[in-house]
Image: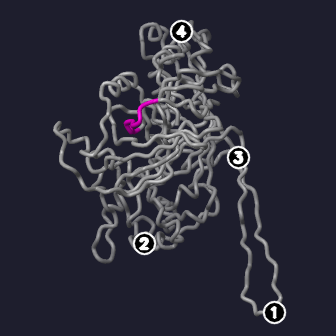
Amino acid sequence: MSDRIEIKAALTVSDAGEITGTAWPFGTPDRVGDVIEKGAFTGPATLPMLFAHDQGQVIGVWEEISETDSGLTVKGRLLVDDVERAREVRAMVKAGAVSGLSIGFVTKDAKRHAKGRTINALELHEISIVAVPAHPGAQITSVKSVSSEKDSPLENQDDQTPANAPEIDLKAFNAVLSRLDKLEAKGQRLGAPAIVQGVEDRKAFVSFLQSGQIDQKALTVAADAPAYVLAPEETSGEFIRNLVEFSPIRAIADVRSTGSHTILLPKRTGITNAVWVGETATRTASEPTFVQMQIEVKEIATHVDLSLRMLEDSGNVEAEVRLALAEDFGAKEALSFVKGSTAVEPTGFMTAAGIAETNNGHATVLSAEALISLMYAMPATYRSRGAWVMNGSTLAAIRKLKDGNGNFLWQPSYQAGQPETILGCAVVEAIDMPDIAAAATPIIFGDFKAGYRIYDRVSLDVLPDLLTQRTTGLARFHARRRVGAGVVRTDVFRKLKMSA
């Protein structure tokens, strides 16, 4: 078997640091069809805890690693008293921004089948906290408080290592880090294989872009488009990370993967009608009402032209393709999540019907009282998890607003990893939101995790065309992505409406 390190994924956290979870569930395949059998895991008794498989971000230590009937269970500690990044990760886990665990290992024995592999033996090297695990069932299950009391410092005076941390074999650990060099397995790849490919697969992808020849051992062909090849994990992971930069809605919405072109969501539209009765009074029947809503997966596509000389001379051509696609796809996706209204794009939350509005009381000047009224018009359950979304010019206007006691509504963030807030709730800046103007709705507030759903079907497919543009010295690369989105709960949102 190959000695390349693979990344598989799944978590919960407390204020102080103890954390437990299932790093790999037994009995079910991951997103690429791989199954790891019980008894396959070998490795040291303790392992480093990384963030997103980045060797530069050691945030804790896994102290207990064991196989149970359900899966590989782990227990460890975030070094929140000693490592700033550990405190930031704790905040992201508590906020629900990251919730998965992902394992890094070297396969020792595996059998291939039509849908993936059955892995019978592997050597475990590290376990990371990630945003999206390769296995949907690999999740943090609990995070408990631990004592923040520190012991005497160790002799090496390493201020990044707590005194009570177990000893780690640094030689073996550094060997793992060298193998993970330049890999940034962010786990952001949804709706496509989440296994991180090594240097060999990156070279195979570059060769595919240059020649059009598919290495079946190193690359994966898209199931719903046989002529397309799924980009290696490092390339596609970078693509998703750029999407988050262009599309901040992904960071606050409920993002899921799907294998279908349409998702049907049962929705309850009524409740039972119970009444108080006497001892022998007749009881009246009632029943809730239900309907079905659907979210259709849409497709976005484009192509990128690169010179034949660049293909011949550049060793990093896939990065050029990735960045060009990320800019275009990311900007278009972000716009659709906000304002999408046509039949061929995802439905935006600003165009969805049925969202209530609060009148600002003025056509062009924001009212602090109106913002307070809007926020408290929301049910308390969703208000506490709500976020404000607006563009930069609107945010600039809000920064000048004060409440009746002279306190600014906007509060800056003084802690890394924590967002700015308005009235205690997070603020997300989206460039596609409307500007302040008469009859406009420049601000929306709501619980996006409960109310806005994004489904990823295909992350990134790339198809090289080395013939049709050759007379002009160019090669064309066609790319496509499939994603659907829509509002699933209108009652958890509220807009600010400027007067006409």
47 in the magenta segment: yes
The residue at 71%/39% (across/down) is 260
**Residue picked out by circle 2:** 372
Asked whether 236 or 27 is in front, the reply is 27
Split into 4 quadrants, where in the image is the N terminus? top right
Query: Where does the magenta region start and end?
Result: 43-51
Q: Looking at the picture, how far across and down is residue 111, in whole percent?
A: 64, 21
Q: Is residue 253 above or below residue 496?
A: above
**Residue picked out by circle 1:** 280
Q: Secondary structure at mark 4?
A: helix
Q: Is residue 494 above or below residue 482?
A: below
Asked whether 338 or 452 is in front, the reply is 452
Asked whether 196 or 456 is in front, the reply is 196
Q: Looking at the picture, how far across and down is residue 159, in whole percent?
A: 20, 42
Lower sequence index among marks 1 and 3 = 3
Residue type beneath disc 3: Ile
Residue type beneath disc 4: Thr
Residue type beneath disc 1: Thr
- Measure the alpha-carbon separation of dots 1 and 3: 47 Å
Is residue 214 in view from this perspective?
A: yes
**Residue picked out by circle 3:** 263
- Measure the alpha-carbon separation of dots 2 and 3: 36 Å
